[in-house]
Amino acid sequence: MHVTSRLLVGALTNIQYVSYPVADGSESGHPVYEVVYEGNRYDRKTANTLCRTSVREAVTESDRLSLQAGDTYRIERYTLHEAVVAADVVTCTLVCMHEPAYGVVKLMGVDGYPEELSFVRTEHDGAIFLNYL
């Protein structure tokens, strides 16, 4: 097990996928991005840059789990998954990484975005979540 998440507020659907490459030059599937970390990937102030690769992959859903506040779910290392949250539902999860993992992190993108996307995680005062624990 790599990550355990507990829903503090709201609801989500966790969908797991199996991916497979599509033929070179094909427009089907999704662009694959690799994450480049500008520093220690486990430091919340480290900038993350998503870099689109030349690879495209298609996905098939392998599991779907609907979760409510108070529920816990686990994600195994290297599992391709998506947490789907309704636009009108405020949702907050507490994520526990059980051990560091090194190597390339990949994710599926969506066509129409730039070749590189950068962001830094936003830090919040943990006290705002105490009532939900």
Image (cartoon, grey):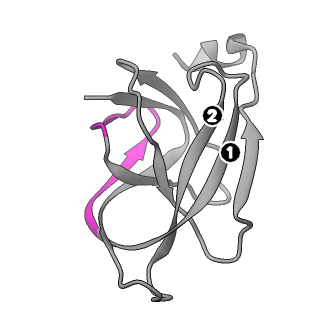
Task: Indicate the position of residue 77 as horizontal and vertical percent values.
Answer: 30, 37
Q: What range of the chain is rendered magenta? A: 61-77
Please name the residue shown 70% across and 64% down the image. Answer: 115
Quadrant in the picture for residue 92: top right
Task: Please tell me which of labels 2 and 1 falls first in the chain.
Answer: 2
Question: Tag 1: Cα neighbours inside 10 Å, few (<14), some, or many (≥20)?
Answer: some
Task: Indicate the position of residue 21 as horizontal and vertical percent values.
Answer: 33, 73
Identify residue type, mark 2: Tyr
Residue 78 left/right relative to 93 = left
Q: Is residue 44 magenta?
A: no
Q: CA distance from mark 2 to mark 1?
A: 6 Å
Q: Which mark is residue 49?
A: 1
Please name the residue shown 36% across and 85% down the image. Answer: 23
Task: Indicate the position of residue 9 as horizontal and vertical percent values.
Answer: 56, 35
Is label 2 in contact with label 1 (beta carbons under 8 Å)?
A: yes
Identify residue type, mark 1: Thr
Q: Which mark is residue 37?
A: 2
Please name the residue shown 41% across and 83% down the image. Answer: 24
